[in-house]
């Protein structure tokens, strides 16, 4: 029994078959102790060869079954480990996907908020521009002094009612349509217009520029103009 226990307790020899064969005087207690000691089988004398062979074959079948069961268990364990790894990877992927979606949703939320703020700011800006335009238009329309815009090629772009009245026209539109060549139709001295062109091109602002101009009825009046140049992004005079 001690030898059997030693064999079975050793990791390298634990798989060795142990078949206890008793002496002539053996009790059931001896058989139980032998099996408890790790024996794979227990037979008592007298023993014939056929009986011994049958015991050995039975033990081999048991061992083969145990080996087959162990192999199945190992395969199942491997599958469980593999599946656990797959599920762990899938779970990690899903967690990352959830985190990514949360980040995307947060980014979308921030973008929507930014667009809302931009839209609100644009509306405020547009309202301010409308108010400024209305204010400018009110000043432009109600000013007692003549206000106008003209182009370098000699035409009026815009004019206020005071400007039209000053030159004897019923409306600014009539003035703009009638005077398409300021140098010849507006200035009494065309050379004065050419001199004005030279000053505005050089200085971008002319103050107190005096000229004699024709009214609609052909009469002449003296005026004093304060003019500022307007240029495009390339510096071209507009």
Image: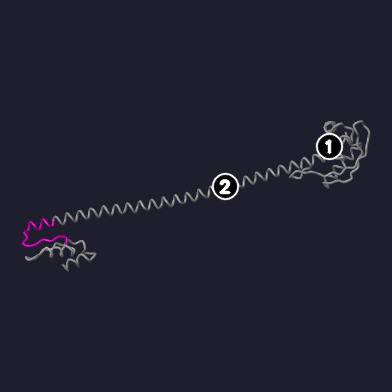
The residue at the point 86 percent across, 35 percent down is 164
Left-right relation of 180 to 31: right
The residue at the point 13 percent across, 61 percent down is 42
The residue at the point 19 percent across, 62 percent down is 16
- Given residues 12 and 139, the one toward you in this image is 139
Q: Quadrant of the N terminus?
A: bottom left
Q: Is residue 105 above or below residue 179?
A: below
The quarter of the displayed image where residue 171 is located = top right
Q: Is residue 45 above or below residue 107?
A: below
Q: Which residue matches tag 2? A: 109
- Given residues 176 and 238, the one toward you in this image is 176
* Label 2 with label 1: CB-CB less than 8 Å: no
Q: Where's residue 90, x and y in %?
A: 41, 50
Q: Give the residues in magenta.
A: 39-56
Q: Where's residue 179, x and y in %?
A: 85, 33
Left-right relation of 46 to 132: left
Q: Quadrant of the C terminus?
A: top right
Q: Earlier in the sequence, mark 2 or mark 1?
A: 2
- Given residues 63 and 175, the one toward you in this image is 63
Q: Which residue matches tag 1? A: 160
Q: Secondary structure at mark 2?
A: helix
The residue at the point 91 percent across, 40 percent down is 223
Q: Where's residue 110, x and y in %?
A: 58, 48
Q: Is residue 82 above or below residue 211?
A: below
The quarter of the displayed image where residue 218 is located = top right
- Given residues 136 and 187, the one toward you in this image is 136
């Amino acid at each position: 029994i001690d030898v059997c226990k030693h064999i079975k307790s050793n990791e390298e020899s634990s798989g060795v078959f142990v078949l206890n064969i008793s002496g002539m005087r053996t009790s059931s207690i001896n058989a139980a102790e032998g099996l408890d000691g790790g024996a794979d089988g227990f037979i008592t004398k007298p023993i014939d060869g056929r009986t011994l062979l049958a015991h050995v074959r039975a033990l081999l079948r048991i061992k083969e079954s145990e080996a087959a069961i162990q192999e199945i268990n190992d395969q199942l364990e491997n599958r469980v480990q593999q599946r656990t790894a797959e599920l762990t990877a899938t779970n990690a992927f899903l967690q990352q996907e959830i985190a990514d979606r949360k980040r995307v949703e947060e980014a979308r939320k921030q973008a929507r908020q930014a667009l809302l703020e931009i839209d609100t700011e644009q509306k405020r800006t547009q309202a301010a521009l409308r108010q400024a335009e209305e204010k400018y238009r009110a000043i432009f329309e109600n000013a007692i002094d003549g206000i106008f815009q003209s182009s370098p090629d000699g035409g009026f772009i815009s004019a206020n009612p005071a400007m039209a009245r000053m030159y004897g026209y019923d409306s600014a539109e009539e003035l703009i349509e009638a005077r398409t060549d300021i140098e010849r139709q507006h200035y009494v001295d065309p050379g004065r217009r050419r001199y004005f062109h030279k000053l505005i091109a050089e200085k971008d602002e002319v103050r107190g520029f005096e000229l004699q101009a024709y009214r609609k009825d052909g009469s002449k009046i003296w005026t004093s103009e304060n003019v500022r140049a307007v240029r495009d992004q390339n510096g071209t005079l507009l």
